[in-house]
Image: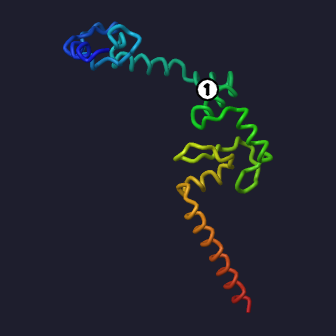
Amino acid sequence: MKLSASLQILNEVKTCTKCREGKPPTEFTRDRRKPDGLMAQCKTCRSKALREWVRNNPNYEKNRYRQNPQWHRERHLIRKYGVNLAEYHRLFETQDGRCAICGRTQQRAFDVDHCHKTKAVRGLLCTNCNRMIGHSGDDPDRLESAARYLRSSRRSRMRSSRESRK
């Protein structure tokens, strides 16, 4: 839509097909498919209709997912990580079905570990290891510092337990 056409629309009033009220174009959601670039129903009417539809169809999303969970899983993996199910399974097999950090298995699917800056996939992690890396801000120095801290506290506990036995 050209600038002059969009300025002209701002001065006009559009009638909602649901409530039949004339409203400014800002009260309508944009829709590139329509000749005037706006939805036929105003935002208020569309919002009411959507709330009613959700109330009348409470399990729609759950049922839709149950019909084809593999498709939804693959769609999620592609959208979020750029990895399809075949690549996920290849990583899983490469790691022998174990977490890339701790080597444990888990009942649920592994989390896809990726660099938040480059979006590159690094491997599959168990939930705990994935959260550990996430909470560290993907900072290896912080994780190494945490490991040193844990080792030093273990040594001090061992010393204190030996001293208490004497």
In this picture, is 23 found above or below 66? Answer: above
> SS of the residue at dot 1?
helix
In this picture, is 40 found above or below 63? Answer: above
Is 73 displayed left or right of 14 in the figure?
right
Question: Which residue is under mark 1?
Answer: 62
**Frontmost residue, 8 versus 28:** 8
Q: Position of residue 100 (x, y in %)?
A: 71, 52
Residue drawn at the location 54% of the way across and 45% of the way down: 118
Residue drawn at the location 21% of the way across and 11% of the way down: 12
Residue drawn at the location 56% of the way across and 64% of the way down: 141
Here the colouring is rainbow
Packing grade of label 1 (10 A; few <14, some 14-19, many >=20) is few
| Quarter occupied by the C terminus | bottom right
Residue type of the residue flagged with mark 1: Lys
Name the outermost residue toward the left: 11
Is 134 displayed left or right of 85 in the figure?
left
Residue drawn at the location 75% of the way across and 44% of the way down: 107
Number of residue marks: 1
**Frontmost residue, 155 versus 117:** 117
**Residue 159 location, quadrant:** bottom right
Q: Position of residue 77 (x, y in %)?
A: 63, 34
| Quarter occupied by the N terminus | top left
**Frontmost residue, 164 versus 135:** 135
Q: Position of residue 88 (x, y in %)?
A: 71, 37
Is 93 displayed left or right of 29 in the figure?
right
Q: Position of residue 71 (x, y in %)?
A: 67, 25
In this picture, is 6 found above or below 145? Answer: above
Name the outermost residue toward the bottom: 166
**Residue 60 location, quadrant:** top right
